[in-house]
Image: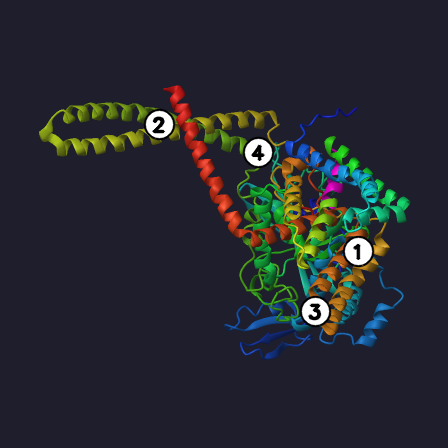
Amino acid sequence: MDDLTLLRKFEPVIRFTEGEFFFPCAVDEYLRGCSLWMRDSKGIERQILTADELSAEALAHFKEVPAGHTLYLRFVENPLDPLEYQRWLLRPDMPTFRAPGRLTRVGLLSRILDSFFSLSLLIRGTVPGGTAAAAQIKYEQIRQRDLRNVYYGRVIREGGYIVLHYLFFYVMNNWRSGFYGINDHEADWEQIFVYLSEGPGGEPVPRWVAFASHDFWGDDLRRRWDDPELHKVDQNHPVVYAGAGSHASYFLPGEYLMSIEPAFLRPLRNGLVFLRKIWAEQLKQGSVDRVDDEVTALLSVPFIDYARGDGLSLGPEQTGGWTPILLTESMDWVEHYRGLWGLDTKDSFGGERAPAGPKFKRDGSVRTAWYDPLGWAGLDKVAPPGQAHGHLKQHIEALTCERTTLEEAIDQKREAVRRLALEVEALRATDYLDHLYQTQQEQLRATQNELQQCYTRYAQVTETRLASQSFLAKLERGSARDDPQAHLRHKRQPEPPVGSQARIAELWAALSSGLLLLAFTMLLVFAPTSWFVWTVLVGLLFAAIDATIRGRLANFLLNLTIILAVITGLILIKDFWWLVLIGGLFALVILMIVENMRELWLGAKGG
Amino acid sequence: MEKEVSVKRPFGVTVIVVLQLVPILMLAMNPVMALFASMINTPSTQLFRLAQQWIARPYLILAVQGGLILLQLAIGVGLWRLRRWAWFLLMIQVGVGMATDLWLYFNGNRLYLGMLINVVTVLYLNLHEVQQAFGHRPESPDNVWTT
């Protein structure tokens, strides 16, 4: 089967969220609408090619740039001004998108961090306001010239697998400006993989699917073809639920909570995790589960990726079908252009910078997923089903050989040890051969060690051989790999729906962090005598209201009690440290005496 | 039908239940002691002032103290039967006690013994084994703040 036929046979279905603006398209028309720019090491930017001059072929000529220089494209040169933007927002064909409860899903502290994140956009390099709207207008013009829904594909044969690599190009990621997400950037490359291997009749059979996903890598990226959470159309086409604006890929439809952990809070987080672990594991207090997750959730900025799958659906038997384009090594724009595919905002966090091409990372190096698609999804260690059986049989044979060799080695070493032991015994009886005695004793020790190592390895080989034989039997019965998700360490699940209190909770979530900061500012302005007490009271009042609205008042009260206990405990230790010290020493003395007396008593009984 | 699994009551819980009886007895003794104080008529004592309060607002005080006795009794019985709601109510009760103690502490009135008993009670009730005895289950992923 040729590459294009293979790609077509297992091409995915992508289901978008209602309100999505941008869909996978060909790069040609996009490039015709872009200009090419270069920024030098001093930060001076100059245009290299105008929109009229730029094409995929022209782009391929820019293979190298001097050190410290950056090449990038610009799709939108003139973002909409505020008035145009408002007109664009109010146009009659504006897609509707409703997003209840991003902030209602997280606590007050996370919402305050969210406010600071929004403020950080003022000082970071970001995509200018009105860019996504202007990009949408240009995208509509592109769609009038080129109606194709395009994926780019390549086929790699490696390690017993046939890897189908599907790449999707979007002219813009408008997650932040369109869907309350983390970032916006011009151009967006997304990818998914289908891994095939030969079936019993020699035909290619799908085994695994991997989707690129935020924060995940290795084994967690892939799902087995028979995983019930992998939706399929017509048994051959995996379904991808694309995040609104972000275009990130998900296996299940729903709303996914993403968190950004600010780097400056990492030391605080590590400290809290450490204290929480001592609290839970050493002092055996509360719950020991998910300490890391709890603290991370507390100190993270929350975002929702809406992958509802209730909008346009592209792929076989869907509203729109695909036009595949096979990527080959002769496509120079893929192979040679290492610059960015959209505006370079110089954002120090990177999120608002456009990505590089399908093959490269922003720093110009080749993407792992491009040169090692098996390793990228943790599949380099997994033999294809047809080959696992043979690999295991060979391994068992090798273990059997090693076992026989070890048995022989053990016999020889045992003989040697016994001979040496006799020699040492004989030499010990003679006073004037002391030097030889020492040497032979050393030799005896070394040979004994070798014998013990042989035994240890023998035990390991025997156990491994038995386990392998048992696993081989299971493979032969077909029951070895029952759980399709056994390889997953982390699994991303959609968030549960927002509860019945959503409207009040949303209003509170929108107002609370601002009101709390206002209350603290008022305290600073009026500076009451007991300012500390007031600050604590205001904080507690807001936290209590927040907990009540989110239906977690009981938890809040329990946590408050525990915090009070810790504070009271620390006060007691401060006021009575000398008593604590003396009491501790006294307890240690008693413990030592009791232990010694017990040993004495048991010894007397035994003797 | 789900079968109820019998759980051994931790010794510390028995001690706490016994300690719960002390305030109940004290509250129950209040009217008797107030009556006694009014009979011996010694206005300088605290008991005499209590007696006067009883005489001035007997129903209000009876209702408040009766309510408190009932609450303490309910918590005691619930703890004895290892009920989760009793564990929760006791934690809240101790929390209120600690908040009061801290307020008094920072105002110069240091009730160290009460503070110590409260801290020990909270830390004991929050132990894994004790929580499990009261039927505590691992939290849902949403309740990220619960200890």
Q: Which labelled disc corresponds to residue A386?
A: 4
**Amino acid, disc 4:** Gly
**Amino acid, disc 1:** Ile
Q: Nearer the viewer, mark 1 or mark 3?
A: 1
Give the residues drawn in magenta, as a range.
Answer: B82-92
Circles 1 and 2 on the same subunit: yes
Q: CA distance from mark 4 to mark 2?
A: 32 Å
Circles 3 and 2 on the same subunit: yes
Name which of mark 4 and mark 3 comes first in the sequence: 3
**Amino acid, disc 3:** Leu
Q: CA distance from mark 3 to mark 2?
A: 68 Å
Q: Is residue A165 above or below residue B68?
A: below
Q: Mark 4–mark 1 contact, CB under 8 Å? A: no
- Per the image, the residue denoted by label 1 is A545
Q: Mark 3–mark 2 contact, CB under 8 Å? A: no
Q: CA distance from mark 4 to mark 3?
A: 55 Å
Residue B89 lies in magenta, yes or no? Answer: yes
Q: Residue at x 76, y 42 (%)?
A: B89
Q: Chain of mark 4?
A: A
Q: Quadrant of residue A182?
A: bottom right
Specify whether residue A166 is in view: no
Element under disc 2 = helix
- Per the image, the residue denoted by label 3 is A119
Q: Quadrant of residue A75?
A: bottom right
Q: CA distance from mark 4 to mark 1?
A: 60 Å
Residue A208 lies in magenta, yes or no? Answer: no
